[in-house]
Amino acid sequence: MSELLLEVKDLKKYFPIKSGFFRKTVGHVKAVDGVSFTVNAGETLGIVGESGCGKSTMGRMLMRVLEPTEGSILFNGQNIAQMSPANLRKLRKDFQMIFQDPSSSLNQKMTIRDLIAEPFHIHGQTSKSDVDQDVIKLLETVGLRSGDRFRHPHEFSGGQRQRIGIARALALNPKLIVADEAVSALDVSIQSQILNLMVELKHQFNLSYIFISHNLAVVKHISDRVGVMYLGNMVEIASKQSLFQKPLHPYTEALLSAAPEPKRNVQRERIILEGDVPSPANPPLGCPFHTRCPKAFDRCSLERPVLKEVLPDHQVACFLY
């Protein structure tokens, strides 16, 4: 049985809405509203959902780039959501992040050598010769040349810059990497190269990933399990095979029906959702999806369903089950 690495419980992030001369708080944008899930060692959990569902906000909370409003983030049994900055700094080498835009995530004034070496200096590994050897090894691991360390980020293509971002994330031998739309800014031909590299590195370094994306095909390629988010809530979590073969939540069914099917002679009946996604500043009572759900009934507008396991390794938050 795999070792539990990360356990997220009832995680919330509310952004205050200010109004008036005195900037009083008149409401909250509920970007993430009670998300719970787990990640095992060596596992890739894909997080999918349409834009604005809160998946990137959630990823930044896992890194403590954003402070959670409520909830716990247990990393190897330690609650990093309530950890002091000093204690968090000691643990931070174990979890890293790959950002969506490789151009803005790399300081354009620094050489690649200095960018990749920075984590070593922050955490006290300051021997110049050791750091140089580590930088060379990391560049070669992600498919770049040792001589590239003397160049600057603007001299590389988008795919190469993302390789540099991956090398930087790997520098301190982390256990968990959160990849936030890590390939969405790249050409399709480059996306597959980066995805395959990430899969290779996962096995080579026994990494765990949380892979955040709106692209179902990308999530299906890289993930072991998949979580589906809607309006700040996790509505379904299942193994990749179970989710794509037998989606249970009506929202997941609609998402999959809209995805292109690469196989010939395979056609899905398109499910058209009516209405717009509600505002996270004023989410509906009950199930967050009931205002657009073709299968909704009276209870859905009164109570909020919780995630429960209805099939082996398959959880869904829906009163149909």
Image (cartoon, grey):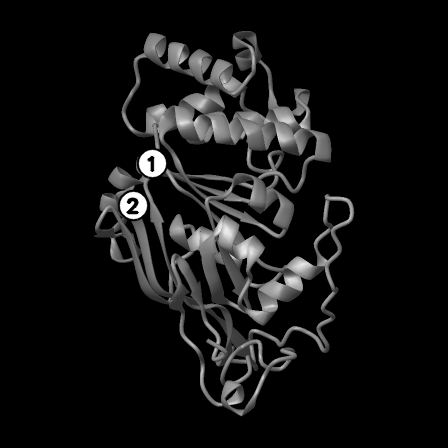
Q: Is residue 195 left or right of residue 257?
A: left
Task: Identify the residue position indicated by label 1 in the image.
Answer: 175
The answer to whether residue 171 is seen in the rendering is no
Q: Is residue 229 left or right of residue 305?
A: right
Asked whether 135 or 18 is in front, the reply is: 135
* Numbered circle sitting on residue 5: 2
Distance from disc 1 to disc 2, alpha carbons, whole Å, reads: 8 Å
Indicate left or right for 165 with 65 as reference.
right
How many labels, in total?
2
Q: Quadrant of residue 193?
A: top right
244 lies above or below 9: above
- At horizontal 45% and vertical 18% (from top left) the residue drawn is 138
Q: Name the disc covering residue 206, or none.
A: none
- The image quadrant of residue 246 is bottom right
For this rendering, which residue is in front, 24 or 27? Answer: 27
Quarter holding the N terminus is top left
Given the image, on which type of amino acid does mark 2 rest? Leu
Given residues 136 and 214, the one toward you in this image is: 214
Q: Residue 3, how many percent across, how many down?
A: 26, 43
x and y, in percent, of residue 180 in the image: 53, 45
Element assignment for label 1? loop
Count residues near mark 2 (Cα–Cα under 10 Å), then give few for <14, some for 14-19, many for 20+. some
| Tag 1–tag 2 contact (CB < 8 Å) | yes
Amino acid carrying label 1: it is: Lys
**Image position, residue 147 (x, y; %):** 55, 7
In-front residue for pair 164/42: 42
* Label 2 SS: strand
Of the numbered discs 1 and 2, the one sitting upstream in the chain is 2
Q: Position of residue 208 (x, y in %)?
A: 39, 39
